[in-house]
Image: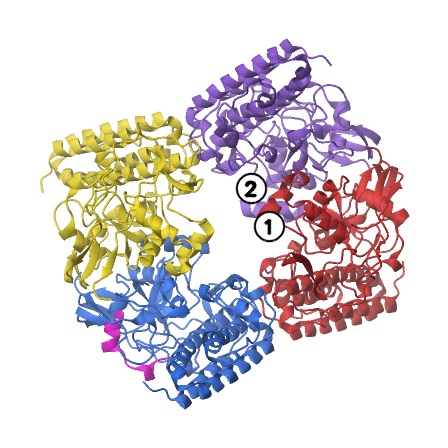
Chain colours: A purple, B red, C blue, D yellow
């Protein structure tokens, strides 16, 4: 496949500059802190995504390469054993240096060197440079989503309750009633097949047998979730997996993350500030354990990732109706019930390799494969996912207790019980 | 189905007395300790299996039931929220009372009351009593296996290296060379179907699509595992899942559990005492992470549980050739390569409900379903599993880092790579 | 000083056999468990005190010495770096072997070898053997007290509430009213001076300046302590040291250890079983933090160790009125207000070396000196201290949060405020 | 005593502005982070010292007082239970807001309101306002020292090794040889007596008996400390308190904090950057445990706080020769052997109330008294202590394992051994 240098340059510029735009509303101080291990300081995201291009591409393809700052290789390697020693992840928030402006200078310098390389590298290098640059850009888009969710945590965790952007017009029409749609099973094909970019973990396309099943055409709303809460959802162990119940006890979970009980009334912290719960919007910031308990309470279940993918292929209403990062709502919205966007939905599938999985070559073999243990698959993207990043075959994954992502619920059920 | 009271009585007597026989070689002190949370004191096993019959059956069906000792209901409930408060699991080893002889008296009393109930309960109660008694007996058999593995840990953890029983004659013939056998895939049926006892988690029988695949007719041996060790298996992160590599670092894993390096020579602690490694016997006491790393190093992979079950149906050589608890070897043996016995094999499948899974009714709904998170499936039984307890559809499950069970490896591979 | 061999033998026999007598009421199982790190299994005490004689004396002085069991040197060394590696303290309760009877055989064998050595060692060795044997016997007496308090913890921690011995006649007369006695200060001598045995930490006698002060002739009673509790003692931070208040919060302290609120009525677990609080008996099982908070609430203070020693010299009514181990009450008693016995009293003095302190020679330098950090001094002995072990100069010491010893309060005050 | 309003205003302005000057070399990012619980973010120091004036003075004395921002009372209360709930100390580094400029605005506003109050408060309020303002200013000076040591930790902990200020001229003359000076003992007066400001914990003056003793006229140098290291100081348990030895093992101590072994050569991180060890300068950043171990190795001991105070009264060469904060070296210097300045010296005395101690009235009772447990006394001030803040009676105190303060050693000894 021939590479279009100017299209790739354009895409590089667009994605790289969006990352900085996402940080524009922040104070310098907001770039520095790490309230929990999961949440990285925004300036770390700015630097790490840049390190990726330097380490994975420039170091190999740039003529007379010299490192921008050798210490940055230590500071901004995330988890690649192949790339040597790293600063400990849980200590990212104790580093005041490099400063934000030093990190932005690092970005500018690497951007310039990358642009020059894209212009000038030999034709023989170009295919590989383009392949790696595409990975680097998709990597950066993943960090754009993390940036949004990490900023939300940093703000929501602060008693001063800073606001990321001002409130937007919301669709106040009542959402249409959720319906369980029947999907035909059989031996189905699952996974990515095609020539465009997809992660190694989406491949190869492979056969899966599934029974006919039911799946909701709507995400579970805050209003529905509050019924679960009112019905003692958080106090009745019968709905919960044992590990989930342990978390309820030890973490004191009584509601989704960011919900707060103000004198008997539930409110939620959003990137647009603290406000009342909108019962019509999809519930977000719940763990797999909560999603599973809700489904149990509702007499239904979560879909497997194969079921979700098969259903999405026939029911998805298209990216144009989805609430994604580009829409700049930074929050799940009512009446946006595409299978894509709004919130990632927890599936009942644990993260494991597809039959015939082949990890990315070289150091990037560490990108996905080594994390295939102890995590659950989420599907569909969220209001923090870039539109040109998401696909029906996209596999996201987190430990079942994580709540800081825009994660929610789409119910499924057996056809015959 | 009509219940044969005398056959059930006989089975009750046999299984209950075997539990006590397994403890016969122990000193009183050996019954008391709990070196790690996973390992329960033998007297706790003796009491808990008895509590099960009292709580689940006698309390409901015995005329004029009075508790043997109300405090025992608190002390010997393992994890049933439905049965109320419990003594904390990790504190089982701090209870010197009830003494071993008090626990044996408890067993004798409940045995007598159970036998009387089996004789005298009304025909209308009998079916339910028999159903629950059968669960109680299978439950007790699971604890027989745990007793053996817990005793092994208690002994191996003691610098005085006590011996459970004396060494037995071993088959010293070199094992036949392992062969990868081809198994045909397609839409296959997996799970238990029939009228005999099986756990809720083995049902319902359901369809799974699998590709044609290869699976070894032999378990991985200690000799093969030592090649992995000599080749730097424990020091090369490339073979490991990230969570597994973390365990290697923090736990200092360099070999299977119970292996010990004496002046450069590996030995192992067994229930028959400390001795040299026999390269011909199946490797045991490894975690899922180690099994997965070994398979990666070997250029192969672990089977899924569906693959294992399908393969076992055609390749299994029968219970009579298997090394099981009844054979009293208390250790994996060479040349016993049935798909059953010797060591449980880790599969690549995480523990989740089969499509259409219906938990056991009532309080026993907690028996299996709530643990379907964070664990991996093992198949096939071990040298510590009773012969009339194991089945090809049997699903065992442990967290991927656990090593104190007789757990090992059977390799699989794709037909076309 | 010449050594009387037969007197020393007699004392050796008496003390060694008392240790075993203290264990006589125990079941074998009671010897094995370690519910918290502070509490050692009784069989460990039996073995460790024996190891002390073998390691410190026999190994050096016995002709043709061979170790009883070399592994015991590893298992029963408590904290002596000089004596090499040790089994970890917090893991003492996971060792089922050696069994109790093996430990008693070890005791018998070492007793016999010690007796023979005391008979047969050369005159030139005798002084040193006698010196070390005397240390060994005082060491064993310390472990007799620990045995009693550890057994109490083991029993009180068990919901079956075992009883060590049956209840005794108690003095039910109301205690005389406590009086604050005035003691004259000045430059006073503190510490041990004389030829009999005393620990290195009691020496040398040295001068201390103290002001005139007041000290109570009575221990604080349970009734007085309940007034503190009723007055919100455990909920008002103003009475507490910051570290103490942290413990109140994190440990949930609401009363002394072993007190339990049964339907609004306080009861206490004793070695004689569970019973109502006797308001007339001295309060016990409180931490330094609680003693200090009580004194603050009462408008008084704790005595320094120098004040206590000076006061005890003039107010002590003699060992014959004290409630000590030999009296076999195993519990503090009313109307026993000698400065000795009943409960150790917390002083306001931290544990530090006396001016001119010289540690014991050789390996026994580790006996006391290295612990002079982070601990508070207690004085006076308790109902678990042997009568011929306690002295007015005796310094006991524990971390300020410890509560499982028989520890209580004697109030002091400034003369002029 | 009449209060001079203009002098007090002047002092207020001077001290408040010095705090900000100390932060002038920092990047905004440097104000935010908290690498360990002990180290507070510089912007927290800026805010907390301001909160103190608002909460302790303005809230009580300002007409029509309204809080600057009520949430600040929650965020910037350090440990005062009397002042209500607080943000958790270990979470100070996760708050990006208020920003540095918001904190500086807070400072400016409270400064203005304080200045107005000092001008306009009634004569009847003035004495109390002045008393509290003086406490507030001394409190701020304590935080100036903490600012310097916290900034040092923040910088030294960063692999980029930022520099606080550039290196200064150092005195390179070899220091004079240390001499042990004899001090006469007896009943001595210790503690503060006078009309100027002193903390409650320095009072009342009281009598202490001490023997004649020896004390060094010099601080222990880095060169001397390296001899201890070379002689196996960190590997020989015999020099160490048991708690100290535990720290050596678990923390891996091999040298003072901030020392780093670069290819076999020791260097140290300073506020002036990384450089070679100067053997002539006083050793700093050692724990009490290390100070005590060094003294043991040297065959000497640490002075008690009474000994230090008595010796300092006769040997101190005056504030003008001392290296203090005002000298802006930000590092211990050779040939500055006053008893004041350079490094605080660990004494052998634990932190406890002087006989007759009366805590500050009101909420400030919490300032010192509640911390009198588990800490050791340090004396003399350091290169980070303001000159008009230190006194011979000044008592500093830290837990014995702390190393991030400028803490060092002055040896003492008994006259007759």
Q: What element carries label 2?
A: loop
* Residue C309 magenta-highlighted: yes
Residue B349 position in % (x across, y down): 75, 42
Which chain hosts label 2?
Answer: A
Which residue occupies the foreground of this view, C315 or D227? Answer: D227
Instruction: Judge the density around disc 1: few (<14), some (14-19), many (≥20) Cα neighbours within 10 Å.
Output: few
Image quarter of residue C349: bottom left
Magenta segment boundaries in residue numbering = C308-323
* In the image: residue B392, left or right of residue D22: right
The numbered mark 1 sits on a residue in which chain?
Answer: B
Q: Which residue is drawn at 53% across and 19% down?
A: A110
SS majority, magenta: helix
To which quarter of the image does residue A142 belong?
Answer: top right
Q: Which mark is residue B252?
A: 1
Q: Position of residue D181 (x, y in %)?
A: 18, 56
- Give the residue at mark 2: A254
Q: Is residue C303 left or right of residue A393?
A: left
Q: Is residue B119 or residue D228 the one in the foreground?
A: D228
């Amino acid at each position: 496949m021939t590479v279009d240098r100017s299209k790739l340059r354009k895409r590089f510029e667009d994605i790289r500059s969006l990352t900085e735009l996402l940080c524009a509303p922040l104070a310098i101080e907001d770039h520095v802190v790490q309230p929990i291990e999961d949440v990285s300081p925004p300036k770390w995201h700015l630097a790490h995504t840049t390190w990726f291009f330097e380490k994975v591409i420039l170091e190999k393809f740039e003529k007379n390469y010299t490192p921008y700052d050798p210490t940055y290789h230590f500071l901004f390697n995330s988890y690649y054993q192949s790339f040597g020693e790293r600063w400990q992840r849980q200590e990212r928030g104790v580093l005041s240096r490099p400063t934000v402006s030093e990190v932005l200078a690092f970005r500018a310098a690497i951007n310039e060197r990358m642009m020059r390389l894209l212009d000038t590298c030999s034709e023989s290098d170009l295919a590989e440079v383009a392949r790696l640059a595409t990975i680097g850009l998709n990597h950066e888009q993943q960090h754009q989503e993390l940036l949004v969710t990490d900023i939300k945590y940093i703000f929501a965790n602060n008693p001063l309750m800073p606001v990321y952007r001002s409130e937007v017009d919301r669709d106040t029409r009542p959402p249409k009633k959720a319906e369980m749609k029947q999907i035909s099973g059989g031996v189905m094909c699952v996974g990515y097949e095609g020539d465009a970019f997809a992660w190694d973990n989406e491949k190869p396309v492979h056969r899966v047998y599934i029974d006919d099943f039911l799946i909701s055409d709507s995400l579970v709303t805050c209003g529905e979730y509050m019924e679960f809460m009112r019905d003692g959802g958080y106090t009745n162990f019968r709905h919960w997996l044992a590990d989930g119940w342990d978390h309820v006890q030890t973490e004191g979970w009584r509601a989704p993350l960011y919900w707060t009980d103000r004198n008997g009334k539930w409110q939620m912290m959003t990137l647009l500030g603290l406000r009342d719960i909108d019962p019509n919007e999809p519930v977000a910031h719940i763990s797999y354990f909560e999603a599973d308990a809700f489904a149990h309470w509702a007499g239904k279940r979560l879909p497997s990732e194969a079921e979700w993918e098969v259903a999405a292929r026939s029911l998805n209403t298209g990216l144009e109706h989805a609430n994604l990062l580009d829409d700049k709502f930074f929050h799940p919205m009512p009446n946006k019930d595409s299978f894509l966007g709004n919130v990632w939905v927890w599936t009942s599938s644990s993260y494991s390799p597809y039959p015939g999985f082949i990890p990315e070559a070289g150091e990037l073999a560490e990108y996905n494969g080594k994390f295939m243990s102890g995590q659950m698959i989420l599907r569909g993207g969220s209001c923090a996912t870039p539109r040109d990043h998401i696909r029906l075959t996209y596999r996201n994954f987190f430990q079942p207790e994580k709540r800081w992502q825009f994660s929610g619920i789409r119910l499924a059920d057996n056809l015959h019980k």
